[in-house]
Image (tube, rainbow, N blue to C red):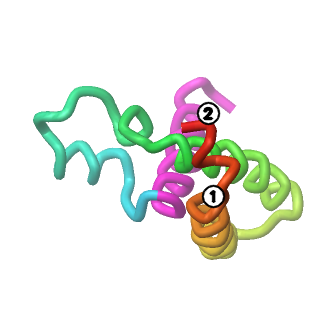
Amino acid sequence: MTKQEINVVYSSEADMLNVALFGMTARQWRNANPKIEGNIRDTASMEQLVILSNMESINAMLIHQQLSMTLRLNQLNQIAIMQMKSLLQSSQLKKLK
């Protein structure tokens, strides 16, 4: 695999994780927020960053299980929703802020 092919795979995986968590790709976010410096992940909340880290690990497992990107996206989106609800309700997390 060439460096360019690796970059394309990495980019599409990152976009899939962005869609699962934020509901949009990095490009869609940039187009919607042209005046904000940085990228979608730079503006993420602490909860979103925790979930993103979890999703990256889970996605690696799902890839190992040879699930399609569509199935992974659906599962990761459900996980993101569940984890966000849990984190936002956690009294321990509120103490960290």
Residue 73 appears anywhere in the view: no
Q: Amino acid at mark 1?
A: Leu
Q: In front here: 5 or 95?
A: 95
Specify whether 45 is left or right of 80. Answer: left
Residue 13: horizontal and vertical position, in percent? Answer: 58, 49
Specify whether 44 is left or right of 74. Answer: left
Q: Amino acid at mark 2?
A: Ile
**Residue at 59% in and 69% down:** 85
Q: Secondary structure at mark 1?
A: helix
**Residue at 46% in and 43% down:** 45
Numbered badge on residue 6 = 2
Range drawn in magenta: 1-21
Residue 76: horizontal and vertical position, in percent? Answer: 65, 66
**Residue at 69% in and 32% down:** 1
Q: In front here: 19 or 67?
A: 19
Please tell me whether residue 35 is drawn above or below residue 83 in the rendered image: above
Specify whether 60 is left or right of 11. Answer: right
Instruction: Look at the magenta stretch and give its main secondary structure.
Output: helix
CA distance for labels 2 and 1: 33 Å
Residue 3 counted in the magenta span = yes
* Residue annotated with mark 1: 87
**Residue at 30% in and 46% down:** 27
Query: Between tags 2 and 1, which lies in front?
Result: 1
